[in-house]
Image (cartoon, helix red, strand yellow):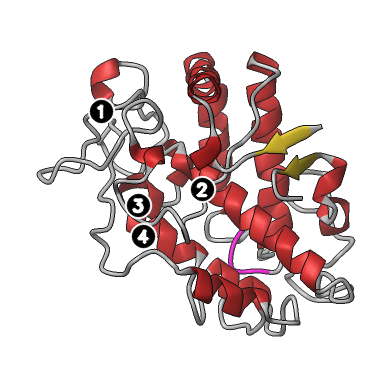
Amino acid sequence: MTVRKNQATLTADEKRRFVAAVLELKRSGRYDAFVTTHNAFIMGDTDNGERTGHRSPSFLPWHRRFLLEFEQALQSVDASVALPYWDWSTNRTARASLWAPDFLGGTGRSVDGRVMDGPFAASTGNWPLTVRVDNRTYLRRSLGAGGRELPTRAEVESVLAMATYDTAPWNSASDGFRNHLEGWRGANLHNRVHVWVGGQMATGVSPNDPVFWLHHAYIDKLWAEWQRRHPGAGYLPTAGTPNVVDLHDTMKPWSDVTPADMLDHTAHYAFDTD
């Protein structure tokens, strides 16, 4: 069973193997396919008007499947690798260990945001950005420059306490756990982290920054925690909802994956705290 660990507890060898597997996916072209997929669904709209990946109830099961496929791609390179998660409610500064040169590298330089250290810096030649929103081909970050601090544990707890998964109108105006976790209302958890990292993380091509995977692995963990705390409160809506992925509807771009298929993470992996 794959066990996803807090990045703060990774050994030097586990960090090295994770980075090496990510770089190999990039070298082979497989990594950029994930960036393309995410960018296509960032606004949460498909060609028939259905909201899928963002601003909708399927935000969480969609990303759970997306991360699972990326983790399986990593494991095709190195079977020992699992996706680590970044608990940004605890590791809340630009000095946290994940930003060290031996792992993800640090913030970008002030003049243009270019990341200058670590394995994903442009100077290594190993991380050219080909799926992008502008002509800049280098990884950018501006850690903490977005105005707001990273979410606190108290803010996380306030969202985990919500007893309903989602509510009408099933979008960025909805109340309930999903939208508060996604960040369009209330504590603004997920969205705020993207803005705090800055650079490509604040755009539709956010997977260009490998921290995307660690951030979303923690979002996925928070969903799993919410599921444990509220065992009687399942995915909503269940059926008959226009332009929204119901419990048993397929989620684009997959032809055979529904939210119901992704409710139990333990069918695929465990967290170190499970």
Distance of label 3 from label 4 (alpha carbons):
5 Å
Separation (CA) of disc 2 from disc 3: 12 Å
Q: Name the residue under label 1.
A: 117
For residue 245, side relative to residue 110 (left or right): right
Dot placed on the residue nearer the N-terminal end, 1 or 2: 2
Disc 4 is placed on an element classified as helix
Give the alpha-carbon distance from disc 4 to disc 1, as whole Å: 21 Å
The residue that disc 4 covers is 195
**Relative to 200, residue 193 above or below:** below
Residue plotted at (66% across, 51% down): 63
Q: Which of marks 4 and 2 is in front?
A: 2
**From mark 4 to mark 2, how far is it between C-alphas?**
15 Å
> Which of pointers 2 and 3 lies earlier in the amino acid sequence?
2
Of the numbered discs 4 and 1, the one sitting upstream in the chain is 1
Residue 104 x/y as whole percent: 39, 33
Q: What residue type is labelled 3?
A: Val
Could you tell me residue 24's position as x and y percent? 52, 15
Q: Which residue is drawn at 35% across and 23% down?
A: 119
Residue at x 50%, y 82% (from the top left corner):
186
Which sits in the foreground, 12 or 79? Answer: 12
Three-letter code, disc 1: Asp
Disc number for residue 197 = 3
Q: First in sequence, mark 3 or 1: give its number.
A: 1
10 Å crowding of disc 1: few (<14), some (14-19), many (20+): many
Q: Give the range drawn in magenta.
A: 52-56
- Give the residue at mark 2: 86
